[in-house]
Amino acid sequence: METFFRVGCQIDEVKLIDLVLRRYHTLDVLKVLDIDQVLRLLLMAIEDEQKERYREEWLHLLPAMVFAQHYMTFEEFYNTCTGANIDNRPVDEIIAEIDRKHAEAREEK
C-alpha cells in the first residue's frame, strides 16, 4: 500500500491516465486487475518511459562519445543517470576493498 501512495504522490493524474491510454488504449484493462497488479503495471510503464527517454538521450550523445573515444554502453549510461551504480556500502568497507586491491596489484608485480 505504501507503493500506491508513493507513486500517487509523484505522478500527475492526467499524466498517469495518458500513460495508461498510450500503452493499453483503454482504462478497461485496469478494471479486471487487483490493486497490486495495477501498481506493478504502472510502475513498469513509468520505468519503461524513463528508460526510453534515457535511451534517446544516449543515442544523441553516442556520436560524440565515439568521436572522443569515451564510449559508454547504454546500460552504463542508464545506471549512471539513475544512480544505480552508486555503492551504498559503508566508507570503511569501500576503502578496505580498495586497499586490498592495491595490495594484490603490488603482489602481482
Image (spheres, rainbow, N blue to C red):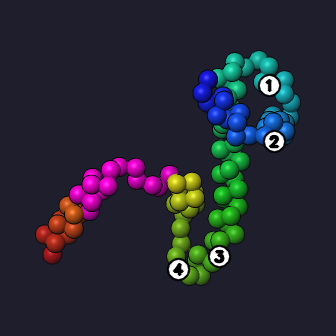
- Say which mark, if any, is on residue 69: 4
Task: Say if 44 sits above or below 87 in the image.
Answer: above
Mark 3 sits on what residue? 63
The amino acid marked with disc number 3 is Pro
First-in-chain label (4 vs 2): 2
Q: Which mark is residue 29?
A: 1
Q: CA distance from mark 3 to mark 2?
A: 32 Å
Find the distance from the CA under tag 3 to the CA under tag 1. 41 Å
Q: CA distance from mark 3 to mark 4?
A: 10 Å
Residue underneath mark 2: 15
Q: Quadrant of the N terminus?
A: top right
Task: Give the amino acid type for the residue marked by disc 2 in the picture.
Answer: Lys
Question: How far, Cα to Cα, is label 1 from label 2?
Answer: 17 Å
Give the answer, above or below, for where 106 lies relative to 67: above
Tell me what residue is drawn at x 52 percent, y 76 percent.
Answer: 70
Residue 85, magenta (yes or no): yes
Check disc 1 and give the amino acid type: Val
Residue 82 location in percent, x, y?
A: 57, 54
Amino acid under label 4? Answer: Gln
The reply to whether the C-beta atoms of the residues labelled 4 and 2 are less than 8 Å apart is no
Q: Residues within 10 Å of mark 2 (few under 14, many from 20)?
A: few
Q: Gap between marks 1 and 4, in whole Å?
A: 47 Å
Segment tinted magenta in the rendering: 84-98
In the rendered view, does 65 fall on the left or right side of 27? Answer: left
Q: What element does badge 4 sit on? A: loop
Residue plotted at (53% across, 72% down): 71
